[in-house]
Amino acid sequence: MTTLTGPAAATRVSRRQQLLVLTGSITGAAVVALDGTVLTVAQPTLRRDLSATFAQVQWTSTAYLIAVTSLLVFAGRLGDRYGQRQVFAVGAIGFGAASAAVGCAPSIGWVIALRAVQGVFGALLQPATLGLLRAAYPPDRLGTPIAVRTAAIGLAAAAGPVIGGALTTHLGWRTVLFLGVVPALAVGALALAVRLPEPTPASPSATAAAARPGLDLPGAALLALTLAGLVHTLTALPHPGAAAPVLTAVAALLLLRHERRTAHPLLPAALLRTAPTAPALAILVSASATVFGSLYLVTYLLQDTLGLSALDGGLRGLPLALAMVGAAPATAALMRRHGPRRTAAPGLLLIAAGALLLSRLAPGTSWSGSAPGFLLLGAGFGAVMVTGTAVVVRRAAVADAGIAGGLQQTAMNLGPALGIAAATTLTALGISPAATVLALAAAAAASLLLTAGLPRA
């Protein structure tokens, strides 16, 4: 088994091992991205076939989101303690098996329950895709593999609506759940069969406790309650009720108190106090909130204002995914030359400009008229994702790579929930979709202030 001895040890990982890690990382990330987009397209047919209510169908997404978001950071720590390879394998195989089970579910209740189970395995899988990269690549070479991973996510997101729409139309909604089963099971089995690099203590004299960081189960439970309550509150807006916000606030206060007092906190102070980490996470939340909140409203503009079908509306959005694919590798090169700060700032401006253009959609807007907005939105999002992710992951020690991956994935899950919640709330207050998209564009532009906290190089 390859022995890693500290942050610089990734340089001793062979090219073959790095290729295996990269293959597993992009496959795992792409499977999760594909699952989300194909199921969204299939939900109307699912509702009719299972005689479900709109609220029940919404819970097929909400149950997954709550499960995955609440467990991401703890799952990252499990990878740090027991090995990223093992946790990745369990997550991938479990995700594939759960996907197949959802596809065979006899009722909407079973679909919701199994989607929650799928979220648990998704939480194990996602941080490990970044934790493995951090263990296998030296910090100054992380930009390129992260860019390839981002491009794969963009391709999966682009393919999902088209493939999902075709399968649902011709073979039924259940078939879309089986798309990721074989890739997930295959990459999980590969991770078990192949010795991938895993970190060990920084020196032979390091203690067993250092080699296996504490799990901090009370902290994990409080963080899970905080995040679950936050996600539930956001998805229930504009009428969340009183219980969820109060529970969230109480859990958050108890978490802060516990983390300050415990000897082995779930959230390592060394990582959180690293100057660029908090701004990078905040930028990821802000950017993803703007992008997904805007897309949520633009979907209605395309169908209700422009009169397009669901398929035609989905095709209108393809430039966004293609721009993400192109922007990701370009961003890695720009970041090496100009540094994260001067790479993230233009990305946020592109997101704001793209949202601004899309807010101006009007009856009669042609494909060429809407494409620039989607292109700018996708290019900006690709740039911010690569930059923010690289800053968070590369600043973490190899022993905390799982936690870093969990924090990044948590930000990428909270952002869309926040953006869609903001869009829903503002439109419920009578603000037009176009004006709401403008507000989201302004939020992305305001996030430029956060780039001051990113490193220059």
Image: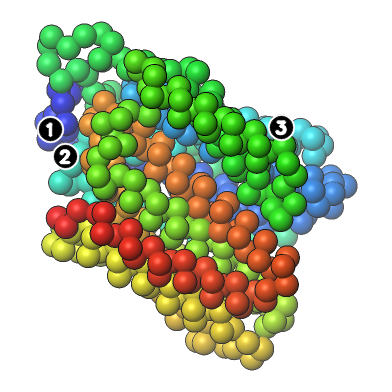
Mark identifier at residue 113: 3
Residue 250 at least partly seen: yes
- Please name the residue shown 12% across and 16% down the image: 203
Quarter of the image where the N terminus is located: top left
Q: First in sequence: mark 2 or mark 3?
A: 3
Residue 429 percent location from the top left of the image: 72, 67
Residue lying farthest to the right in this orientation: 51
Name the mark on residue 8: 1
Q: Quadrant of the C terminus?
A: bottom left
Q: Residues within 10 Å of mark 2 (few under 14, many from 20)?
A: some
Task: Quadrant for residue 447, please give it.
Answer: bottom left
x and y, in percent, of residue 198 in the image: 26, 24
Q: Distance between the Cα atoms at labels 2 and 1?
A: 6 Å
Q: Amino acid at mark 1?
A: Ala
Front in this rendered view, residue 271 or 174 = 271
Q: Is residue 228 visible?
A: no
Q: Are marks 2 and 1 in contact (CB under 8 Å)?
A: yes
- Mark on residue 138? 2
Which of the two discs, 3 and 1, labels the residue nearer the N terminus? 1
User: Residue 70 appears at what percent x and percent y?
Assistant: 54, 34
